[in-house]
Amino acid sequence: MSSSRKLDQLYRQVIMDHYKNPRNKGELTDSNITIDLNNPTCGDQIHLHLKIEAGTITAASFTGEGCSISMASASMMTMSIIGHTEKEALEMSRQFSEMVQGHDHEPIDEDGDVEALAGVAKFPARIKCATLAWKAMERAIYEKEGGDIDD
Ligand code: ZN
C-alpha cells in the first residue's frame, strides 16, 4: 500500500470516528446563540449552539442530521473552536475553506483531526457538506456581534 493510500485510510478512520462518536453533540442549555443551517444539495441540517462570553467561545454543541462528512465536520469544528476568540474562530474557518478547496492553509486545530477532511477537495460536491458547520459558526458570530468583532 502506498503511503498516500495509508494516509487516506487513516483520514477515513478519523472521519468515521467523529461521525459515529460525535463530540459536543446535543443541546446546550446555556447557549446564547443558535443558528440553523441547511445544505440542500445533500440534505444536511445543523443546529449550532454557541456560548460566547466576552468575545470568547466558551461552549459549543450541535444537533441535526446529515451525511458522515457534515456530521464529522461539525464534531471537529466544535472541538476546534471551544476556548478560542471569535476572531480566531473566524480565521480557522477561513483556513478550513482554503483547505477543502485544495489550497495552501495554516494548521487549523491543535490535534490535527480537521486535516482528515482535506481530501474533500477531490470531491467538489461534498465541499458544502464539510463547510456547513463552519458557515453556521461564522453566521452565529456575526449575528451575535452584529458584524463588530473585537480582537
Ligand atoms: Zn452532506
Image: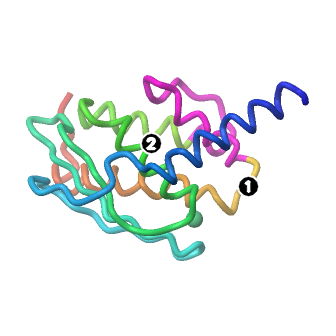
Q: Amino acid at mark 1?
A: Phe
**In the depicted structure, whether residue 116 falls above or below residue 48:** above
For disc 2, the neighbor class at 10 Å (few under 14, some 14 to 19, many from 20) is: many
130 to the left or right of 110: right
**In the depicted structure, whether residue 72 falls above or below residue 81:** below
The secondary structure type at the circle numbered 1 is loop
- The residue labelled by disc 1 is 123
The secondary structure type at the circle numbered 2 is helix
* Residue lying at 17% horizontally and 37% vertically, measured from the top left: 58
Give the mark toward the camera: 2 or 1: 2
**112 inside magenta stretch:** yes
Q: Quadrant of the C terminus?
A: top left
Q: Quadrant of the N terminus?
A: top right
* Residue lying at 68% horizontally and 63% vertically, measured from the top left: 125
105 to the left or right of 109: right
Spot occupied by residue 127 in the image (x, y as percentages of width and height): 61, 55
The colour scheme of the drawn protein is rainbow
* Residue lying at 16% horizontally and 49% vertically, measured from the top left: 145
Q: In front: 24, or 118?
A: 24
Spot occupied by residue 62 in the image (x, y as percentages of width and height): 32, 57
The circle on residue 39 is: none
Q: Amino acid at mark 2?
A: Met
For disc 1, the neighbor class at 10 Å (few under 14, some 14 to 19, many from 20) is: few
111 to the left or right of 37: right
109 to the left or right of 67: left
- The residue labelled by disc 2 is 76
Quarter of image, res 53? top left
* Residue lying at 65% horizontally and 39% vertically, measured from the top left: 118
> The magenta stretch spans which residues?
98-121
